[in-house]
Amino acid sequence: MLRKLLSCFFLYCLCVQTPPTVLAGSAPSAAKTLVWGPGLEANIVLPARFFFIQAVDSGGRNFTSSPGENTFEVKIVAPGEPFSRIWVQVLDRRDGSFLVRYRMYASYPSLQIEILLKGKHVAKSPFVLKGPVYHESCDCPEPSGDVWQEHMHCPSSIPQILRDLAPFPTVDPDRNALDVPRRFGQRQSLCHYTIKDNKVYIKTHGEHVGFRIFMDAFLLSLTRKVKLPDVEFFVNLGDWPLEKRRPPETVHPIFSWCGSNDTRDIVMPTYDLTESVLETMGRVSLDMMSVQANTGPPWEEKNATAFWRGRDSRKERLELVKLGRAHPDLIDAAFTNFFFFKHDESLYGPLVKHVSFFDFFKFKYQVNVDGTVAAYRLPYLLAGDSVVLKQDSSYYEHFYSDLKPWEHYIPFKSDLSDLLEKIRWARDHDEEVRRIAKSGQEFARAHLMGDNIFCYYYKLFQVMVHGNSVLFINVASY
Ligand SMILES: *[C@@H]1O[C@H](CO)[C@@H](O)[C@H](O)[C@H]1NC(C)=O
Ligand SMILES: *[C@@H]1O[C@H](CO)[C@@H](O)[C@H](O)[C@H]1NC(C)=O
Ligand SMILES: *[C@@H]1O[C@H](CO)[C@@H](O)[C@H](O)[C@H]1NC(C)=O
């Protein structure tokens, strides 16, 4: 109904000659609208490329709600090619901005991106990307890592990487290749990767090595984009971080998808996030871009109950569901699956049907509580426009140390003892909470996209190789 009304309003604006001051802000201006992002640069090769459009009116004011899903038309063609195999999607983020993503199925000498508003070119459209413009499968590595990082606008250093690698100023790869399988290879699932001349060699240890497909796929994608330094490393394919030793004991470098306060594993972006980067506009439906187009109703219309769905992979999750059953006015938490604990329906209620992740954002407050390890849904929760209530935890992903409580999320204690209090606080401080939701979302938009993930992995290998030089000097200050 509201939409209908709005579109009538639009028609009115267009048809009736009114002075601009009266209804200013109601129509975007082609000249003032802003367009930016990595997808406008030929040298930023990503599985799905993307850029942004911010609708701006003729008075220079940003739209803060959608000017209409089909406001902008985007055409991407390869000049001179009879058929361009490029799939384009314009995603309405409903905050006045749009995310445009496209996936190429061939490489082209150049690319032309046209952004149109009622047939008029927007901003500096058409954008011409002077190529070659490579597609994801092109085996076309940039020989210089420095040049590639400059193209990608990678950060010059990443504190989490410096901290993780600090205990390993030098590593003897031969020693490591013997020690690590001896210590962990029987009970754990490990993969020993060797990158030599930008080729990836793999040796697995342990039985359950299925998860290596994620790592393999990502490394192959990275080596198609940039020449990697020669490195060897062990990836832990299991859930839990492994290295519990501390100096002066010999600590071994192990790459894991999850870190913890009690271990010294080197964290990498999770298999879940890397998979979704590679398979955006492909095999996955939940990725950091699609979530931005599916953030539910506007804030005022979201349900002010805290929401959670998941499986029983940790005791605190049982606590959460019990809390929800005792306080249904505050928390809607239910299991979709029982696997780890005995299911007692009188305590935990019936299993409920799986809810589409995008439907989580009908609720204002998203509860993030550990599963087996850190809950890998956090990047997607942050990208929605609900606020995240995050459990204090000793587990972390590669980006947690950049998140600040009360700025990007609302913290609660690991035993959940203050969760109800925090939800009540949130209800009483709606403006402030909305601001936290927004800055969490901005964080995700700026730091957890495909280009960020590729930079993180590259940086990890680069620092490993050059680790025993100047890069380590400043570690203590982080
Ligand atoms: C409008 O949006 C752009 C893009 O997000 C932003 O850089 C700019 O600061 C905004 N302008 C105002 C006046 O808020
Ligand atoms: C909000 O969600 C709760 C829990 O799912 C539900 O019981 C309640 O009816 C919803 N409130 C509104 C106004 O829809
Ligand atoms: C883990 O370490 C972080 C960062 O130092 C800290 O904020 C957090 O409270 C710790 N959590 C637990 C449960 O140890």
Image: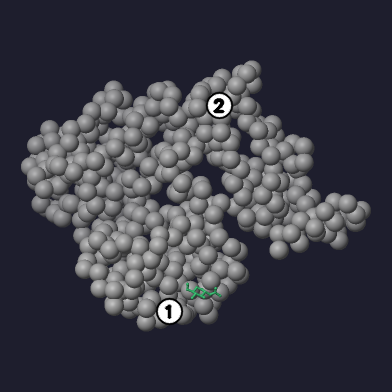
- Residue 36 in percent (x, y) is at 61, 41
The answer to whether any part of residue 211 appears in the image is yes
- Which label is found at residue 85? 2
- Return the residue at label 1: 328
Quadrant where the image shows the C terminus:
bottom left
- Residue 214 in percent (x, y) is at 31, 40
Q: CA distance from mark 1 to mark 2?
A: 51 Å
10 Å neighbourhood of mark 2: few (<14), some, or many (≥20)? some
- Residue 373 in percent (x, y) is at 27, 58
Quadrant where the image shows the N terminus:
bottom right
Position of residue 104 relative to residue 441, above or below, is above
Amino acid type of the residue that numbered disc 2 sits on in the rendered structure: Arg
- Residue 112 in percent (x, y) is at 64, 28
Amino acid type of the residue that numbered disc 1 sits on in the rendered structure: Pro
**Mark 1: secondary structure:** loop
Q: Quadrant of residue 279?
A: top left
- Residue at 14% across, 42% down: 207
Badge 1 residue CB within 8 Å of ligand 2: yes
- Which label is found at residue 273? none
Badge 2 residue CB within 8 Å of ligand 1: no
Q: Quadrant of residue 412?
A: bottom left
Position of residue 472 relative to residue 141, above or below, is below
- Residue at 10% across, 52% down: 249
Front residue of this view, candidates 413 and 86: 86
- Residue at 45% across, 49% down: 286
> Which of the two labelled residues, at mark 1 and mark 2, occupies the earlier sequence position?
2
- Residue at 29% across, 77% down: 347
